[in-house]
Amino acid sequence: MICTWQIWETTAGLKAISSGKYLYFNCGFLNIHIGGENMIDELLKGILIHAYNTVSFYKESYDEAGINPEGFCSTEDFHRVPLVTKNDVQLYSDKFFSSDYAYYPKRDDIIVTCTSGSTGRLLKLNWSKQDIVRAQFNLWKVRMRVYGVHPKSKFFSFHSVTYGGNKAIEAPEIIIDDMGRHMSVSRVLKDEKYLEKYYGYMMDFGPEWIMTMPSTMYLLARFISDNGLTSPKTLKYIELSGEYLFDRQREKIRETFNVPVANMYGSEETNGIAIECRSGHMHCMGDNVYVEILKDGNPARYGEEGDVYVTSLTNTAMPFIRYSQGDRAILYPPETCSCGNQNPVIKVSAGRIGQNVLIEGREPLGSFVFCYAFEVINRYMKYPVLQFQVIQETMKRFTVRLVIRKSFEGWKDAIQTEFIGQMEKLGLSNLDWQFDYENNIMPSPVSGKLQFFVNKVEVNI
Ligand SMILES: [Zn+2]
């Protein structure tokens, strides 16, 4: 069957895409699919063709599998597309870059970042500035319609690594940008004095919304309630992402700040994947990503837990197609939520428990400090670390498992010294750090999950 498609854009912003028997409307966050259940989404097909034509990794891999996305019509065709792991991206990172962006002027639009995600595997990522705006747009539609904040609203956040040009730089304590509309403070909280100071900055600034990780927001909420302080009167909304959100954290944050708290599931590779509605359901962002749950490599049924695979519909500089997100989740069918958003609902499993580092006599410390340390080491030392995992064995003893590039075999002492230096800044250098070098760090045989931080002391926050 030959697939044809057209796009109309009306003054009301309503788009309609016709594809054979399939009709797709997009009106804000409301996606309505009519008929042709098995027809492939045209946005999805478009990015597959782009990847095949301009990205050498996909060209080679699809040729080897004997597939050509130009001829794809059904979701069955899509299910023949080879899966991509973080390991593939790490080993062949240059082969994931689209030739569309190889030359000036498009080359100058590329922003390079580094991410460790939840699995501790460090990846170098490329996004074009236009694609970031398109990816963010999908998130903004929800923030504006559901939570009443817009891109010009005053916004408070926490940062770890920051980028100057395309280089990671040490995180300054406070950043104010976007013409004074955005304030960000360092997420690396050395002690309670910093919470007090950052609380003061936040109150003076008067944000309309805050975005950060649950563990950071929880610490701030506890600080406010323990000290009988007030929250900003200007605040309308809090968005949490980057870690599993525990009910206890959510309740504490909502009770302290008295505004809607939404969970956002996303990744550096794809940007927003799903965001929570007022009814508490995480709806996938169908305009930005195509989400699949696979069990043993095959599509899982609705309601069945499996591995999360995402296809970015907006990242054209470094396409991610059927990419293993490293998380486990359950997908529920569309049209089950009272909010009216008919995108499927995803429930991400608690795969990141034990996310806090526990040190005697101190507030729990978010384990992202290890990501930060290795991201800085990689930037300074030209990417020696491929993968890491930190295990807290006791309150004082830690094992740091490392996979490093072969060419850095002679640099182990330097990597350790740099790591201890990073820990010293957090007041953690007096702990017992044991380093183990390995060829690969595999997911836990018990849970099937790969986590960059494992806390054997206590799994509850
Ligand atoms: Zn909903």
Image (spheres, rainbow, N blue to C red):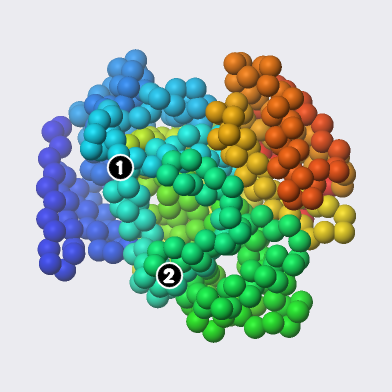
Q: Nearer the viewer, residue 407 or 398?
A: 407
In percent of width and height, residue 113 lies at 46, 41
Q: Does residue 387 appear left or right of residue 155 in this picture?
A: right
**Mark 1 residue type:** Asp
| Residue 9 appears in the picture as rendered | yes
Q: Residue at x 29, y 48 (%)?
A: 130
Q: Which image quarter holds the N terminus? A: top left
In percent of width and height, residue 107 lies at 29, 35
Label for residue 181? 2
Q: Does residue 59 appear left or right of residue 6 in this picture?
A: right
Q: Residue at x 74, y 32 (%)?
A: 417
The answer to whether residue 369 is above or below residue 123 is below
Q: Is mark 1 within 8 Å of ligand 1?
A: no
Quarter of image, res 431 = top right
Label for residue 109? 1
**Mark 2 residue type:** Arg
Q: Nearer the viewer, residue 102 or 215?
A: 102
Structural distance between the alpha carbons of marks 1 and 2: 24 Å
In percent of width and height, residue 94 lies at 40, 25
Bin the neighbour count of mark 2 within 10 Å (Cα to Cα): few under 14, some 14-19, many 20 and up: some
Q: Residue at x 32, y 37 (%)?
A: 317
Q: Secondary structure at mark 2?
A: loop
The answer to whether residue 115 is above or below residue 176 is above
Q: Residue at x 77, y 57 (%)?
A: 364
Label for residue 231? none
Q: Earlier in the sequence, mark 1 or mark 2?
A: 1
Q: Does residue 417 appear left or right of residue 261 in this picture?
A: right
Quarter of image, res 77 = top left
